[in-house]
Image (cartoon, rainbow, N blue to C red):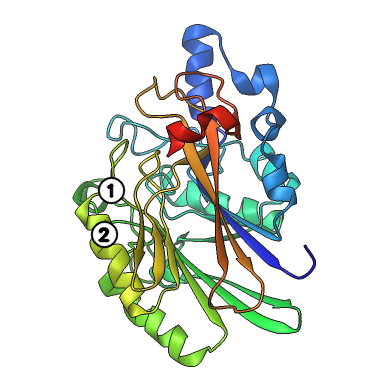
Amino acid sequence: MDNELRITFYGDFTFGENYQARYDYFEKINSLRQNGYDYLFQKVEHFFKNSDYNIVNLESPITNSLKSSLEYKKACIHWCDLEVAPKIMKKYNIHAASLGNNHGYDYGELGLKQSLEALDKVQIKHFGAAMNEKSAKEPLVEHFDYNGKPLNLYVFGGYKYREDYKTEFNFYAQGETKGGVNLLMPEKVCDDIKKIKNEDSNAFIVMFPHYGFDLQKTVQMQKEMSRAFIDSGADIVIGHGPHMINQIEYYNNKSIIYSLGNFIFNADFRGRMTPYNLVASLVFKDDIQKPAIELYPVHMNTNSKTPQTRPIEKQEIDEVI
């Protein structure tokens, strides 16, 4: 609608080239070869078309590197096609991508550098990982003017602390020369949140953390982190990481969505969780500090090597709730 501004957030997102290559080798099944990349968006394209600004959690480096230093160390190493992936993202109206997750540095500094350059080439903004610590911690910043009112959107991305990711995988950005993902912890970001709120009366701050544990419900760590973000001035927390919906909480008059789950994730989860996930839209109308929060349940088959995301059907509503 002309009198509203719609900003939409999507959960875990990957074209799954690494998974499909493995299925292709062992089982002669490859959804990207058989159906094409557009198949993944076929039934959810309207979300991107109907939103003014779309932000995804991109769970794969965009790279043509053939070698990762994490092979035989890390269970799953992601990559997506250097030429095709960014063009498809641009085609479907994706404006920004968080790289601050447990796959953003799977191919080291080369993979990260290629990712940043590939997204820059198609004018998709990125945040949550960079070639030095200062840049990695910087939020996505977008300035909107709707109905004559300014809105400055800040979105912080990053990945929780894990000892193996720090000491064994060397995953986090450090200092002026070490690239990697942003280590997103309250003690590292809360002062930044307070500073923005003190200096910018038109700021709306979204925390977009990658945290929790795969295929598990909300844990105390997520609650402590998210509440600290809210207490520091963040306006909403929209989490991702567990590959499934987590708890939704209303805390100090602010919303915390602990996990949206998957959005497009082209891999077989062997039915280990429910197929239901969420898309979250912030709809700004009159008060920039109080947008409507619209949640849209979507279905992605969790027991298929060729999964396709779609809106839920009426008879599935009770299963989601």
Q: Which x, y percent locates residue 70?
A: 33, 38
Q: Quadrant of the N terminus?
A: bottom right
Q: Which residue is mark 1?
A: 218
Q: Which x, y percent locates residue 75?
A: 31, 31
Work out whether residue 247 or residue 222 is closer to the camera in this orientation and state it.
247
Q: Quadrant of residue 103?
A: top left
- Identified at 71% across, 61% down, the residue is 52
Label number found at residue 223? 2
Give the amino acid type for the residue marked by disc 1 in the picture. Thr
> How busy is the neighbourhood of tag 2: few (under 14 within 10 Å), some, or many (20 plus)?
some
Q: CB of mark 2 within 8 Å of CB of mark 1?
A: yes
Q: Give the distance between the C-alpha atoms of the residues marked 2 and 1, in whole angstroms.
A: 8 Å
Q: Quadrant of residue 72?
A: top left
Q: Which x, y percent locates residue 179?
A: 41, 60
Give the amino acid type for the residue marked by disc 2 in the picture. Lys
Asked if residue 134 is positioned above or below residue 179 in the image, the reply reads below
- Identified at 49% across, 18% down, the residue is 304
